Amino acid sequence: MSFLSEALWVLLLGSLLGLELIGKVPPTLHTPLMSGANAISGITMLAALTLIIKANGNIPLLIMGSVSLSFALFNVIGGFFVTDRMLAMFSRKTINRKDNH
């Protein structure tokens, strides 16, 4: 088996496992799960930056690092937006009252 076919099998199996696991998470745990995913994506961003720096002009490594960096960055930014939106649902709303005294 070549490296590319092994990598595609790992990607496929990881995607199916992730889909199965995420589908069973109750809604109350989505915010902590998103925070954990952001931390993992931060590590992925560092690894992708390291790959880009160490590529030494190797085009396939530069492409792989760039794609990894863009996916991880997209996940981190989206995770922060979703987390901020979910936390806003639990914040207290201010009530504007007019004093008629």
Image (spheres, rainbow, N blue to C red):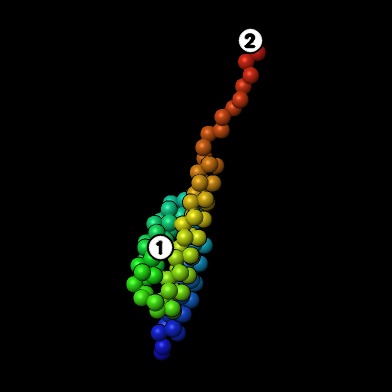
Q: Is residue 17 visible?
A: no
Mark 1 and mark 2 lie on one chain; the one further toward the N terminus is 1
Alpha-carbon span between mark 1 and mark 2? 59 Å
- Of the numbered discs in the image, which one, if any, rests on residue 29? none
Q: Is residue 74 visible?
A: yes
The picture places residue 2, in percent across and down from the top left corner, at 41, 88
- Of the numbered discs in the image, which one, if any, rests on residue 45? 1
The picture places residue 98, in percent across and down from the top left corner, at 63, 19
Reading the image, the residue beneath label 2 is: 101
Count of numbered circles in the view: 2
Whether 76 is drawn above or below 98: the answer is below
Element type where label 1 sits in the image? helix
Question: Farthest residue in the bottom direction?
Answer: 1
- Looking at the rendering, in which quadrant would you find the C terminus? top right
At x 62% / y 15%, what residue is drawn? 99
Question: Farthest residue in the top direction?
Answer: 101
Disc 2 residue type (three-letter): His
- For the residue carrying disc 1, how many other residues have a C-alpha within 10 Å: few (<14), some (14-19), or many (20+)? many
Determine whether label 1 and label 2 are within 8 Å by CB. Answer: no
Tell which of 82 and 70 is nearer to you.
70
Tell which of 23 and 65 is nearer to you.
65
Observer-side mark, 1 or 2, equals 1
The picture places residue 61, in percent across and down from the top left corner, at 41, 76
At x 37% / y 75%, what residue is drawn? 55
Whether 25 is drawn above or below 16: the answer is above
The picture places residue 56, in percent across and down from the top left corner, at 36, 75
